[in-house]
Amino acid sequence: MFAYIKGTVADIGEDCCVIDVHDVGINIHISAQTAARMPGVGQEARLYTYTSVREDAFWLYGFLSKGDLEMFKRCITVSGIGPKGALGLLSVMDGDQLRFAILSQDIKAISQAPGIGKRTAERLVLELKDKLNYDTADISREIDGGNAGVAGTVLDHPGKREAVEALVALGYGQTEAMKAVSQVEGADTMDSSALLKQALKKMF
């Protein structure tokens, strides 16, 4: 129903906020990630929204980026994951991190979300991994420093792939390893050994 809500932040909670739009306070459910990145009270904010209509409730879910909203909508198509579960997933990782976790089949990382057990995480990966790709990462997100788009070549570059495998062997999560390797400047010209050293620096 609403593509986005734009107005003044009147209140921010752990899982919801109130946006004042022309003296009307609109309550919007948000993830912990969104709450942490929200502008302060009294400042202007734009939240991309999803409207959930049930017999007994009319709820709005809001996100600061279109990428997070898209991942939310993808998640609620999976059997057993409703809006609350999808919001929980996007509370422990942002949209790009969740996309990376699904594509790398990182069940452990996904299972850290509240209410998402191993079986549900496996179902999420099974149903979404073929519908996602790295090229759809939200490269406009300022918090990612413009590095999200680089991750699209991690699995296609032999040196990067070997560096990721080495980090995983050292005990790092696959999602965490992929993100670290993707953030190494000049990675395309490095061999796996040099990449590993630089990626390890990103982990600290």
Image (cartoon, rainbow, N blue to C red):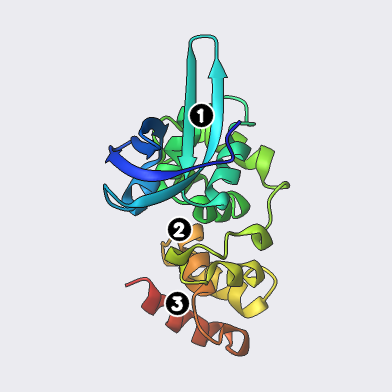
Q: Identify residue type, mark 2.
A: Gly
Q: Identify residue type, mark 1.
A: Pro
Helix, strand or loop for disc 2: loop
For residue 173, which numbered disc appears in the image?
2
- Circle 3 residues within 10 Å: few <14, some 14–19, many ≥20: many
Q: Identify residue type, mark 3.
A: Ala
For this rendering, which residue is in front, 171 or 49? 49
When the figure is inspected, residue 169 is found, relative to residue 24, above or below; the finding is below
Residue 106 appears left or right of 128 = left
Q: Earlier in the sequence, mark 1 or mark 3?
A: 1
Q: In the rendering, at what x and y percent does residue 117 appear? A: 46, 32
For this rendering, which residue is in front, 132 or 139? 139
For residue 83, which numbered disc appears in the image?
1
* Residue 104, visible in the rendered structure: yes
When the figure is inspected, residue 37 is found, relative to residue 204, above or below; the finding is above
Q: In the rendering, at what x and y percent does residue 158 appear? A: 66, 77
Helix, strand or loop for disc 3: helix
Helix, strand or loop for disc 1: helix
Distance between the alpha carbons at the discs numbered 1 and 3? 35 Å
Q: How many marks?
A: 3
Residue at x-position 58% and y-position 87%: 191
Residue at x-position 34% and y-position 37%: 17
Q: Nearer the viewer, mark 1 or mark 2?
A: 1
